[in-house]
Image (cartoon, rainbow, N blue to C red):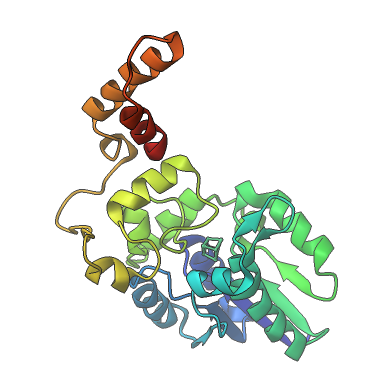
Amino acid sequence: MDQTVGYFSAGGSSAVAIKLAIDQIQRVMYTHIDDQHPDSMRFVKDCEQWFGKEVEIWQSPFKSVDSVCRYNSFIRSRQTGAVCTKHLKRTVRKQFEYENEGNLRIVWGLDFDEKDRASDIVSNMPNHEHLFPLIDREMTKEHAHAVLAASGIRRPAMYDLGYHNNNCIGCVKGGMGYWNKIRVDFPTPGSPERSMTEPGTIPHDSSLPPKTLSNSKKPVEILRKFEVLTSEILSGAADVPKSMILAFFEIF
Ligand code: SF4
C-alpha cells in the first residue's frame, strides 16, 4: 500500500477513529457540503490541530443538497438511496480513489454498532484495504464522544442541539421526528445562512436549551380542533363546511 487515508466526516466517531490510527495515516480527507452546520468547519480545524496533520477539504461542484437534487430532479429512493449522498460524498471520494487506484488503505469512522456497514464496505471496495479502528476496539459512538470530551475537543454543535449525527441541516434521509425538530431549530432547511436571513424564519437562539421532540410538537389546540373535525367527517355528522374540509386536507 502506498498510502493510508482517513476519511473524515466531521462527525465525532470518524475524528476519534482517525486520531487512533494517526500514526499510520498520510492524508486526511473531508468532503464538505454547504448544508453542514457552520460549526462543522470549526470542528474540522480543531481536529486538524488534534491530529497534527492537515485535513484536505474536498467538495463536489454541486456544493449543496438543493442544487444536486434540482439538477437531478430527484431526492431519494429505497432502491438507489439519496442522490445527494451519491454526488456530494461518494462521487468525490471515488475521484480521490480513482487518482490513487489500487494503492489505498482507508481508515473509516464506523463504530462497533455499524459492523454490517463495515462488511458491506469491505465487499464493495475490494481494490482497497480498510481499517476500522473503533470496531477493532469495540468502541461505540458513546465511547468515541467520551474520548473527544476527555481530549478537550468540543464536538460539532448539531450533537448538542440533540441530533444523533452531524449531518446536513435538513437531511433528506431523516424521518418524521427528525423533521419536526429541524423545522423548529432551522425553519428554512438547507444552508444555515439562508435559515438565519430569509424572511419569516426564526434562527435558533443558542442561549436557549436544545429543543427536544416533545417541545417541538404541534400546538395541542390545533390538534384538538382537527380531531373534532375528523370525527365529524368520518361519522357523517351534518354540515361540516366545505372550507373547513379543504383547510383540513391542506394541512395534512
Ligand atoms: S447528510 Fe443527508 S442531506 Fe446530507 S448528503 Fe447525506 S443524505 Fe444528503
- Kindly give the residue lying farthest to the left in the view shown: 207
The part of the image, by quadrant, that contains residue 239 is top left
Task: Describe residue 190's horizontal placement relative to residue 244 as left or right.
Answer: right
Vertically, is 139 above or below 46? above
The answer to whether residue 2 is seen in the rendering is no
The N terminus, quarter of image: bottom right
The C terminus, quarter of image: top left
The answer to whether residue 189 is seen in the rendering is yes
Viewer-nearest residue: 40 or 119 = 40
The part of the image, by quadrant, that contains residue 169 is bottom left
Vertically, is 169 above or below 94? above
Viewer-nearest residue: 191 or 10 = 191
Viewer-nearest residue: 95 or 190 = 190
The part of the image, by quadrant, that contains residue 160 is bottom left
- Residue at 54% from the left image edge and 83% from the top image edge: 59
Q: Give residue 102's position: percent from left, percent from top.
A: 83, 84
Q: Give residue 232's position: percent from left, percent from top.
A: 37, 13
- Residue at 79% from the left image edge and 85% from the top image edge: 103
- Residue at 30% from the left image edge and 73% from the top image edge: 193
Task: Describe residue 72's horizontal placement relative to residue 179 as left or right.
Answer: right
- Residue at 75% from the left image edge and 62% from the top image edge: 121
Total residue callouts: 0
Q: Give residue 16's position: percent from left, percent from top.
A: 50, 65
Q: Give residue 89's position: percent from left, percent from top.
A: 60, 73
